Amino acid sequence: MSAQIIDGKAFAGTVREKVAAHVTKLKTDHNITPGLAVVLVGEDPASQVYVRSKGKQTTEVGMKSVEHKLDVETSEADLLAVIDQLNNDDSIHGILVQLPLPKHLNEDLVINSIDPSKDVDGFHISNVGMLSTGQKSMVPCTPLGCLMMLRDHHGSLSGMNAVVIGRSNIVGKPMAQLLLGDSCTVTIAHSRTKDLPEVVRRADIVVAAVGRPEMVPGDWIKEGATVIDVGINRIPAPEKGEGKHRLVGDADFATCSERAGAITPVPGGVGPMTIACLLANTLTACCRANGLEEPEGLTA
Ligand code: NAD
């Protein structure tokens, strides 16, 4: 069997179009422009790339984009003051603090100082609690993107066996909560799981979020299962020239795609969905803040 490729790049484009259309309607009907503020502390090169890309895509869908670039030595008090100002700014509906933060800053404290209704990353303790109790919350972007692709591919996920490999707060745990919310039977596997291949072989849906290049081989995959590959790993690619690299996922694409019914590629699968979902979350936050109907199909 040759798996259907789930094209995350194209899907993300569709999500952005939906967001842009809704933003236009908000402006015309209500004179409201959703605003997203991104706070970056320090000069981590990867973070700078992400922040630039977020800013560009935010303005492309017609939203207001604000960037706060703070010195690497910014004190916790100064960072909290910036967040407080954004919490109280009615033109800002989403606040994202780019992680990781420099070591002298307490990430939990900083994230939990964001107004939960503006926490478009969905990392605030209140949003984590609300997601796990099935209440309306802000949902972390990467798992939300995975859920959207799964719903699009399968329609209903009810009763399916889902195995999430990885238990991080950013991907694994919220992904498991979302799948549970869609009535899957969910197993969370991690570094201490015994007989991982056997656990994964039971899955109708496999979400791999580990960060180990190509660790899931095709013979772990049940025939016809759907594989959502969250991993982004840079590996040497001497075939492209000396010192060159390429990106691979946590699933071994060549062998997994022979057994899976559908699979997300890396790159071009889950990755592009993350920023698209950040925009969707900002729009949702804006609609909620103004007591307006939420956009359909862009939330959990
Ligand atoms: P993390 O390091 O926080 O968590 C990794 C998890 O994998 C841990 O819970 C650990 O228990 C588990 N694990 C480690 N070794 C294992 C093993 N041998 N068997 C089973 N489980 C094992 O990572 P994360 O932040 O959740 O990210 C995971 C991957 O997803 C990374 O490659 C990251 O780059 C990628 N990622 C992609 C996006 C995106 O937008 N596509 C977003 C976030 C993370």
Image (tube, rainbow, N blue to C red):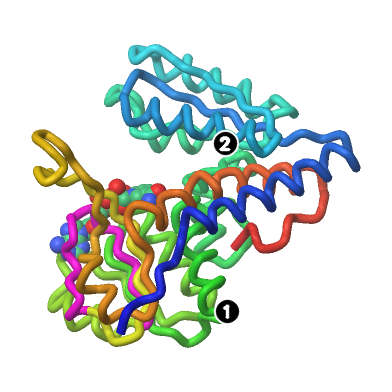
Drawn side of residue 122 relative to residue 87, left or right? left
- Residue at position x 64%, y 58% from top? 298
Locate residue 234, reporting x and y percent. Answer: 21, 44
- Which residue occupies the foreground of this view, 287 or 114? 287
- Which residue occupies the foreground of this view, 129 or 245? 245
- Residue at position x 20%, y 73% from top? 255
Specify the label residue 155 is tagged with. Answer: 1
- Which residue occupies the foreground of this view, 294 or 63? 63
Which residues make up the magenta segment?
A: 204-220
Q: In which quarter of the image is the C terminus?
A: bottom right
- Whether residue 170 is visible here, answered yes or no, is no
- Residue type pointed to by label 1: Gly
Q: Is 94 drawn above or below residue 5 in the view shown?
A: above
Residue 216: in magenta span: yes
Figure quarter occupied by ligand 1? bottom left
Locate residue 258, reporting x and y percent. Answer: 26, 78
The residue to which callout 2 is attached is 57
Q: Is 11 drawn above or below residue 3 in the view shown?
A: above
How far apart are the alpha carbons under marks 2 and 1?
28 Å
Residue 257: in magenta span: no
Tell me the SS state at disc 1.
Answer: loop
Locate residue 193, reporting x and y percent. Answer: 17, 71
Q: Is 149 drawn above or below residue 197 in the view shown?
A: above
Q: Dot 2 surroundings within 10 Å: few (below 14), some, or many (20 or more)? A: some
- Residue at position x 40%, y 74% from top? 4
- Residue type pointed to by label 2: Gln
